[in-house]
Image (cartoon, coloured by chain):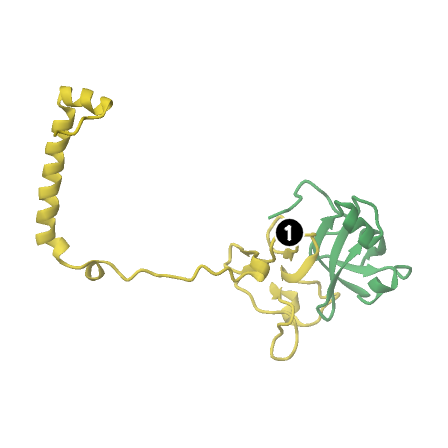
Amino acid sequence: MATDQTMIYKFNWGEPVKVIDCAPEKYLSVGQGSVCGIRKIENKSVASEFNEPIGTVLYLVEGSTGEAIEIPERFLVAL
Amino acid sequence: MAKAWPPRLAKAKKTGAVVAGMVGLGKLDRFLRNLDKTTAAKSAPELLPPPITRDRINTAPQNGTIFVDSKGNAIPAPLGGSITGSPDGRYIQARDANGNPTGVRIDGGHSPKTHTDPRALGPHGHVPGVTNADGTPWLPIKQ
């Protein structure tokens, strides 16, 4: 299983987070949620999909109803 | 007309190795014949349980891979897919060939700050399109 055990992320698995108000509309629907997955953008395809540079950390955030989406780190704050 | 021995065996014949081997084979043959009269007289199905045969059909999505965690929970990923997760193995996500989450995942539990359903607070699974009877997505898993 791919885990980056040497990497220290801003948020940890299970940690509650909140989407900041100035985030793109597609992320605001989650509002606040819990981190359940973490990955870094490693290629141009994913970078363009998220409109973020390679190396950006994406957090899979599950909202209160169970839906989950990946959100770039800069749009999240600790709850 | 006697068949010519291959060069390597001809040399061995001179040393008697082949003859000894033939004698050995004769003993083996007698042993097998005796075995037939005793235990081998029983047919194989009487001695062994019936073999378990399964169709060699890949049931993973898109002929992918089914990963299984230490608790025995299966996490299917499509062809070229993978799994990622936390170092402690409590959170595991299936991902497609591009690294995008498929929606199949195991969560170690969420914060009560963000989730109120008790099933979401403890370890649970998610499978797209599968819910509990009440429509909630936090599925029970082996713990």
Q: Colour of chain A?
A: green
Q: Left or right: where does residue B52 sit relative to residue B22?
A: right
Residue in view at x 14 percent, y 19 percent: B14
Q: What is the crowding at mark 1: few (fewer than 14 residues within 10 Å), some, or many (at least 20)? A: many
Q: Left or right: where does residue A54 sit relative to residue B56?
A: right
Q: Quadrant of the C terminus of chain A?
A: bottom right
| Residue named by callout 1 | B84
* Residue B93 position within the rendered picture, expressed as x and y whole percent measured from the top left: 64, 57
* Residue B19 position within the rendered picture, expressed as x and y whole percent measured from the top left: 12, 28
* Residue B109 position within the rendered picture, expressed as x and y whole percent measured from the top left: 65, 62
Q: Nearer the viewer, residue A66 or B129?
A: B129
Q: Colour of chain B?
A: yellow
- In the displayed structure, B134 sits above or below B122; it is below
Residue in view at x 80 percent, y 54 percent: A49
* Residue B70 position within the rendered picture, expressed as x and y whole percent measured from the top left: 51, 54
As drawn, which residue projects farthest toward the bottom? B134
- In the displayed structure, A41 sits above or below A66; it is above
Residue in view at x 62 percent, y 72 percent: B130
Q: Nearer the viewer, residue A72 or B50?
A: B50
The quarter of the displayed image where residue B127 is located: bottom right
- Amino acid marked by disc 1: Thr
Q: Nearer the viewer, residue B64 or B17?
A: B17
Q: Nearer the viewer, residue A59 or B39?
A: B39
- In the displayed structure, B7 sits above or below B77; it is above
- Tell me the chain of label 1: B
Total number of numbered labels?
1
Q: Secondary structure at mark 1?
A: strand
